[in-house]
Each structure stands twice: as structure tokens, then as C-alpha cells.
Amino acid sequence: MDKIPFTLPGLENIKSELNNLKKEERPAVIKAISTAREHGDLKENAEYHAAKEKQSFIEGRITELEDVVSRAEVIDLNKLSGKTITFGTKVKIVDEETDQETDYQIVGPYEANLELGLISIASPIAKALIGKEKGSSVEVKTPSGSKNYEIISIEVIKL
């Protein structure tokens, strides 16, 4: 099985979600199913069917997260040099057409959150940036066409 790269905070977030699902969400949905059963005929009981659907989602998510945690590999960001872009580095780039600056940190696929500037190592932009140095120009192939960016800075987030 392939290892899944994580930053330490990213893995802690996944473990926290898993713990919440097991200790809070799972017991709550079991209680909701039990309460809905008490209302009689299950064929026409919308509360029962909604609770069963939620239970199915929760159990699926627990299974997925247990698999992810078992294959997680925490990358020690303290060992990174910051000379080139790698997993875990924070990078500031500028769009060469619009001069718009953007900050990204390259993280694992389960940590990615574009609103927080966290992009997956598997994303097209991360793939284009990996291995590049400050001052380099990179071409990123996107669904809407190619975009060119200049790397302004590279920073290693020390934990």
C-alpha cells in the first residue's frame, strides 16, 4: 500500500475528525435510529431513513480515515532546506500576466484546502512547482490553458 504524505498538523486534524466520528457522531446517530424506530412503521419513517443514511456516511468515513491514518507518513518539515520547493514548503508566486500574488503551502491530498492556501502535492500547480528555486518561472497547464508564474519566495514552516 502506498504511504500518504502528511504534515504533522494535517495528520492531527485527520485523527481529530476520526475521534469525533467514533466518539460523538456514531453514538448520536445510533441514538437517532433507536428513537426513530420507536415511532413505528419503518417503511414510511423519514427520520429513520435519514438516520440510516447518515450512519452509512459516518461508517464509510470512519473506514476511509482509519485506512488513511494507517498509511500516513509524516514528513519532518524541520529537515527541509528551503532552497527548492518540496512537500511542506510555503511558496509565494506571482501570475506573470496579472501580477497577482498568491501564497500556497504544498501538503498531502487529505490536507488540501484552497481557501487556506493549502494545495495538494498531486495538483497541477504543485507538480509544476516541485523542485524549482526562487526566481524561477514555471508554466502550469490548467484546464483553461497554460499560466506562467514566477516564484517570489520559498519558506519552510518549522514546527
Image: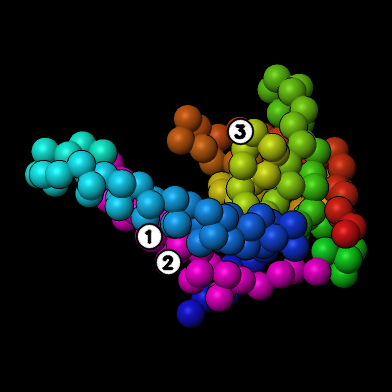
Task: Name the image quarter holding residue 14.
Answer: bottom right
Residue 107 spot, x, y in % from top left: 67, 54
Does residue 143 show up magenta in the picture?
Answer: no
Select label 3 or label 1 by which is in front: 1
| First in residue order: circle 2 vs circle 3 | 2
Does residue 60 show up magenta in the picture?
Answer: yes
Q: Is residue 83 left or right of residue 71?
A: right
* Separation of marks 2 and 1 at Cα, in angstroms: 5 Å
Residue 41 spot, x, y in % from top left: 11, 44
Q: Compare residues 66 and 148 and report the one nearer the observer.
A: 66
Is residue 48 something one can see in this rendering? no
Secondary element under disc 3, as helix, strand or loop, is strand
Type of amino acid at the residue the image marks with label 1: Gly
Look at the numbered discs 2 and 1 and tell me whether their residues touch, using CB distance below 8 Å: yes
Residue for badge 3: 147
* Separation of marks 3 and 1 at Cα, in angstroms: 38 Å
* Separation of marks 2 and 3 at Cα, in angstroms: 38 Å
Dot 2, crowdedness within 10 Å: few (<14), some or many (≥20)? few
Disc ID at residue 60: 1
Residue at figure coordinates x 82%, y 57% from the top left: 84
| First in residue order: circle 3 vs circle 1 | 1
Residue 146 spot, x, y in % from top left: 55, 35
Residue at figure coordinates x 20%, y 41% from the top left: 39
Residue for badge 2: 63
Task: Name the image quarter holding residue 69.
Answer: bottom right
Residue 72 spot, x, y in % from top left: 61, 71
